[in-house]
Amino acid sequence: MPDAYVKIIRREREILVAACDAEILGKTLRKNELVFEVRESFYKGSKMRIREAVALIRSATTANLVGLNIVKTAVKEGLVHPEAVIVISGVPHAQIVKI
C-alpha cells in the first residue's frame, strides 16, 4: 500500500489531521479559477503507510485529505461520503469535520 504524509495539529480539544498522498506533496492543483497548493508547511509531517494514516484520521476532530489513495481509503472505511469528495486536476480532496 502507498505512503502518505500526515501532520497532526493539536489545539485545546481539537485535533486536525492533514494527510496527502506522498507523491503529490508540493504540487499545485488547478481547476478553472481554483488553485489548490499541497503545501509542505501544512501537509508534511510523518511519512507512513495509508492504513496508519487512517487510524490517525479516525481520532481527528477535523481532517483535510488530498490524493487518490488517502481519499479512496477514507471513503472505503466509511470516514468520507463519496459525494463529499471534490476532484481538482484529477486529484480527490475531502474534508472531515466532526461536530
Image: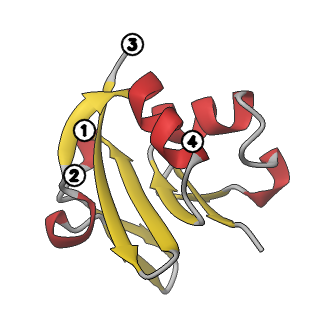
The part of the image, by quadrant, that contains residue 71 is top right
Quarter placement of the N terminus: top left
Q: How many marks?
A: 4
Tell me whether the residue at label 1 lies in contact with that at label 2, contact meaning CB atoms closer than 8 angstroms: yes
State the mark number for residue 1. 3
Q: Position of residue 57 (x, y in %)?
A: 53, 47
Query: For mark 2, what is the residue?
Result: 25
Query: For mark 4, what is the residue?
Result: 71
State the mark number for residue 22. 1
Q: In the shown orientation, is residue 69 left or right of residue 95?
A: left
Callout 2, which amino acid? Leu
Tell me whether the residue at label 4 lies in contact with that at label 2, contact meaning CB atoms closer than 8 angstroms: no
Q: CA distance from mark 4 to mark 2?
A: 14 Å
Callout 1, which amino acid? Ala
Q: Position of residue 77 (x, y in %)?
A: 71, 30
Q: Residue at x 60, y 44 (%)?
A: 58
